[in-house]
Image: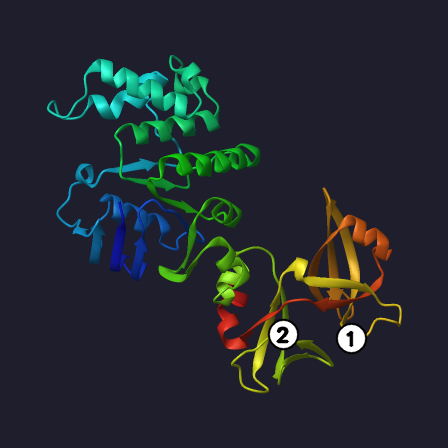
Amino acid sequence: MSITVSQINKRFGSFAALDDVSLEFPSGELVALLGPSGCGKTTLLRIIAGLEQADSGDVSLDGVDAAGMHVRERAVGFVFQHYALFRHMSVFDNVAFGLRVKNRDQRPSETEIRRKVTDLLTLVQLDWLADRYPSQLSGGQRQRIALARALAVEPKVLLLDEPFGALDAKVRKELRRWLRQLHDELHITSIFVTHDQEEALEVADRVVLMDHGRIEQIGTPDEVYDHPASPFVYGFLGSVNLFHGRVDGQSLRVGEHAIDLPSHDLANDAAAVGYVRPHELQLLPDDGKTQGGLPARVLRITSSGALASVELSRGEGEGEHLEVTVFRDTLRQLGVKEGDRVRLKPQRVQVFSAESAAPLLAA
């Protein structure tokens, strides 16, 4: 089922939860709504489900206006962050619940229900827990049961609201991989809400970045990460180093130093901010042989697996803090240690006007 939302507006008192939001969700696609808390993600999800009414705008399901459709008519499966399983029911009965409460003329026979529930529990790899109760399951198992229950009524759309938010990091990562595999098997149009950028980039076909009730950018995970459309997107999708300066032709003048810029449309001498991710900064020893680059001092080095994170300071004292990510082997070859003077060469930089970056810097 394809979904189209057109010019959706929703306010709660003086707060604008959604501000003229228009989006298309093609059939069979897995889309992440990504953004900080309060940006409108869950409100949009609930409006699509029919659990919330927009102040204005339209929702269409397969080209049909959903305004007059009851929640049940929308063929939507909803999975919440906190499972919402019935504690007094077994795992089997939880999954069967949606089938057993259907109208009599639509309700499958008990034999058919048993077959279908067994198949779903096998699909989520938990058929061996059919007789257990929710209190006897781990958080990851409960969330998979909640997903099986949502799938039992054969929804045409699956909506997931922070589905892994209550789980620890290891379980969350395992379930992300599992959800992606499940979607590839079922091809149900799916929309999931998250504020975890790693989760969105790892799982989704497309990512919709939202902030203050508006759409900031839409694209594949690679598109939004490699080509952020705004300072907000750059800052939200992982760590970033900021270089404040003025445009000087195809360079950003940072004090007495210059950073080469790609093509841009900023006026000469305009105040600007260069954005460089930690892995896009080349770290070189300041041994008198290195030409160019910006001087900095190493404050701290921490390691995580094969990678090392190097915290640095530009200027005297603590100065402006920066971060570089390098392979530990590269760091060993360079012989760089805490307290050393180094040079930094951006390998890739994107520049925005200081005015457009101001709201992010003030946040």
What amino acid is found at the position of numbered circle 2 in the picture? His
> Which residue appears at 65% of the width and 80% of the height?
251
Name the side, left or right, on which 63 lies relative to 42: left
Quadrant of res 58: bottom left
What kind of element bears circle 2?
strand
What amino acid is found at the position of numbered circle 1 in the picture? Gly
Query: In the image, residue 143 lies at what x, y percent?
Result: 42, 30
User: How far is the residue under mark 1 from the one under mark 2?
Assistant: 18 Å
| Mark nearer the viewer, 1 or 2 | 1
Disc 1 designates what residue? Answer: 292
> Which residue appears at 28% of the width and 46% of the height?
46
Disc 2 designates what residue? Answer: 244
Name the side, left or right, on which 180 lies relative to 148: right
Query: In the image, residue 297 lies at what x, y percent?
Result: 80, 64
Q: Let me know if residue 88 appears in the view.
A: no
> Which residue appears at 78% of the width and 75% of the height?
292
Query: In the image, residue 356 lies at what x, y percent?
Result: 49, 73
